[in-house]
């Protein structure tokens, strides 16, 4: 292997490193804050009861979900952030993402985990099985987990356990969420911006599909029921403010 080739390879990797460093320095920061609502109030875990569109009362003790592929768009869409985040009501309600300078009017993210990560098996960080969001290598990750209790539940102890996931066709439960910003978002080098996002549980029960607790108190594997609930994800989210 001659010296010219080695110098060329070394220059290429140095250029790649500098390009990544320069891109990182030129970016702004975007904070996404998620607020969970039900019955026109911010949801309180365990202590408060709520009623869905079918007059079924319930309380929620745990709410966790994955978001990934965060990006924004204006006249053009920027490359998405490949990091995967696990949010949990009352513990981790926000995430930071790097965004290139520009003016944007839309926000996109995926609720769920891409099939490539599911096929790889258990991971680390947000995808660590210790987070309680991994079924098996065959079923992959739980994308959205909601647990609680309801008088309408026919399960033992009147449980509600909705573990929504699955990456195999035709029951892939990952959904792209597209949200229009109420005002334009201007990102500059080194800037820090915040988008407040509401997650409305009312629309979880009553969206594109009707989900009644009396009929579906326990959903704990991929399939048609989980896929229908995933169809309701888009209408659960809205943006309350950009600043």
Image: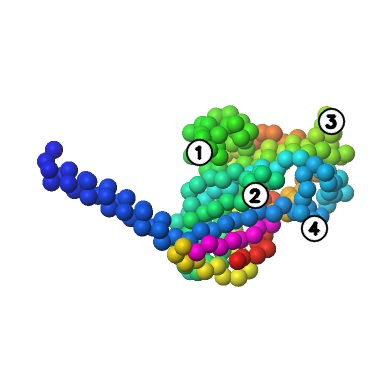
In this image, 154 relative to 100: left or right? right
Foreground residue among 155 and 149: 149
Q: Quadrant of the C terminus?
A: bottom right
Q: Is residue 17 above or below residue 150?
A: below
Foreground residue among 106 and 229: 106
Query: Which badge, 4 or 2, is on the more N-terminal residue?
Result: 4
Q: Predominant secondary structure in magenta?
A: strand
Would you name the residue on which mark 1 appears? 117
Query: Which badge, 1 or 3, is on the more N-terminal residue?
Result: 1
Q: CA distance from mark 2 to mark 1?
A: 23 Å
Q: CA distance from mark 1 to mark 3?
A: 34 Å
Query: Which mark, by number, is residue 40?
Result: 4
Query: Which badge, 1 or 4, is on the more N-terminal residue?
Result: 4
- Which percent across, then down, holds residue 117? 50, 38
Dot 4: what SS?
Answer: loop
Q: Residue at x 77, y 50 (%)?
A: 43
In this image, 108 relative to 52: left or right? left
Q: CA distance from mark 4 to mark 2?
A: 19 Å
Query: Which badge, 2 or 1, is on the more N-terminal residue?
Result: 2
Dot 1: what SS?
Answer: helix
Would you name the residue on which mark 3 appears? 157
Would you name the residue on which mark 2 appears? 93
Q: Residue at x 69, y 57 (%)?
A: 198
């Amino acid at each position: 292997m001659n010296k010219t080739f080695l110098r060329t390879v070394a220059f290429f990797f140095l250029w790649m490193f500098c390009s990544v460093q320069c891109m990182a320095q030129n970016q702004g920061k975007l904070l996404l804050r998620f607020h969970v609502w039900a019955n026109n109030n911010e949801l309180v875990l365990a202590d408060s009861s709520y009623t869905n569109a079918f007059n079924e009362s319930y309380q929620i003790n745990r709410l966790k979900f994955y978001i990934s592929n965060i990006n924004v768009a204006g006249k053009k869409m920027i490359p998405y952030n490949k990091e995967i985040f696990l949010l949990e009501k009352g513990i981790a309600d926000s995430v930071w993402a790097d965004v290139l300078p520009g003016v944007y009017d839309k926000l996109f993210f995926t609720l769920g985990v891409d099939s490539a990560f599911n096929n790889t098996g258990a991971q680390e960080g947000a995808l660590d099985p210790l987070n309680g969001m991994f079924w098996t290598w065959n079923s992959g990750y739980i994308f959205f987990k909601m647990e609680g209790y309801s008088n309408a539940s026919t399960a033992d102890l009147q449980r509600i356990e909705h573990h929504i996931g699955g990456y195999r066709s035709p029951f892939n439960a990952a959904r792209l969420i597209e949200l229009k910003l109420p005002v334009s978002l201007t990102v500059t080098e080194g800037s820090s911006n915040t988008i407040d996002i509401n997650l409305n549980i009312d629309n979880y029960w009553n969206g594109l599909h009707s989900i009644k607790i009396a009929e579906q108190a326990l959903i704990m594997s991929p399939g048609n029921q989980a896929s229908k609930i995933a169809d309701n994800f888009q209408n659960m989210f809205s943006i309350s403010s950009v600043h």
